[in-house]
Amino acid sequence: MECFQAKADKDEVLRKIEHCIFAFCLSLFIGPRPALYLPRVKEYALEMTTRNCHMFPIILCLLSESYSLLRNSQHSTKRNLFYKHRHLFRSAGDLDRAIKAICKILVTPRYKFNILSSPKGLVLGDLVFQLGNAEIVDCNSVSTIPTRSDEFQVVTSSATFILIVEKDSIFEKLAMERTNSVLRSAILITAKGYPDFPTRLFLRKLYEDLKLPMFALMDADPCGIEIFLTYKYGPMNISYESGVNVLLPWMKWIGVYPSEISSLNLSDTQKLMLGVRERKLIYSLLNRFEACGDHFLISQLHELNKIGCKVKIEAICSINSSYLIHEYLKIKVENIQMRN
């Protein structure tokens, strides 16, 4: 059934590309100006102007590359395409803008064009999965999240929850000390900062297969909170390119909370003052999420703005070497599991 669905998806994208190219050729003849759009849908049309004319060769090239990749059941990364057609691009930004335009014109997420981001996410825990090419990945040692992270099947897992960690330095610490702790039954994941599309897609597929609770450990600062919200609700400007179907609304933030800063035994040197840009980010997040009904999130943003300082996860490690795992996380996870 999944193979049939994948073929149907591929055929649909191929038809969309064909119709878009036909419509573009038609616009060259009948005007009023060249345009890229999807006939009968025309949700988004890109008309050629003096300001965007340099983008048309790039978009047409990417449509051609995608058509070839789909027909031959192959994949390519953005990086490979950038260097293959380096003469077309003024910068990597041109490639990103072209991909976003294609996704909007054809109303299709990027991964369905077989154009993928180079993955940066890591996973560790009691999880074994099989890739589409039959390769088996054992995550009991640190593994890279696959590029085509929707095409895998869980073989086995006895994990009881998933913990998403903001940064790789903390991921590495938890990985080294997880054996005799509450984390021995966890699947640990990090995207090394702001989550990339393959990591978010992997998490979505993992939840659909295992239905495990997901927790997020982030810095008590505006960027940490924004990263958590990107996992949960998507990026600020969500689009077909960034992934409309990989949201994780069930994810729970378990720390570090701004309201905890005063009760943690931290030195003043661990409490860093908020900058002007961070204050602006707090106001931006409040404007976006004030009406979402998450009163705890809103209260934490207001608290962060009130106290005017931030704390990194590393600061909790400074209390003592085992405090983060054997006390802080242990209490957090056990309390949530008891309530559930």
Image (cartoon, rainbow, N blue to C red):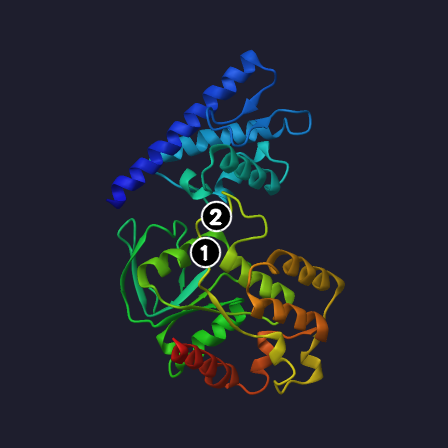
Residue placed most toward the observer, 221 or 285: 285
Marks 1 and 2 sit apart, C-alpha to C-alpha, by 9 Å
Instruction: Indicate which disc residue 200 carries.
Output: 1
Farthest top residue?
A: 29
Residues tagged 1 and 2 counted as in contact (Cβ below 8 A): yes
Farthest right residue?
A: 276
Residue placed most toward the observer, 80 or 18: 18
Where's residue 264, x and y in %? 61, 85
Question: Is residue 20 among the parts visible in the rendering?
Answer: yes
Residue placed most toward the observer, 181 or 135: 181
Where's residue 238, x and y in %? 54, 48
Q: Label 2: few (<14), some or many (≥20) within 10 Å?
A: some
Give the position of the C terminus as an image quadrant: bottom left
Report the number of numbered marks.
Answer: 2
Q: Label 1: few (<14), some or many (≥20) within 10 Å?
A: many
Which residue lies under the disc numbered 2? 243
Q: Closer to the N terminus: mark 1 or mark 2?
A: 1
Identity, as a three-letter code, of the amino acid under mark 1: Arg
Q: Secondary structure at mark 2?
A: loop
Identity, as a three-letter code, of the amino acid under mark 2: Gly
Where's residue 252, x and y in %? 48, 68
What residue do we see at 48% from left, 51% from top? Answer: 197
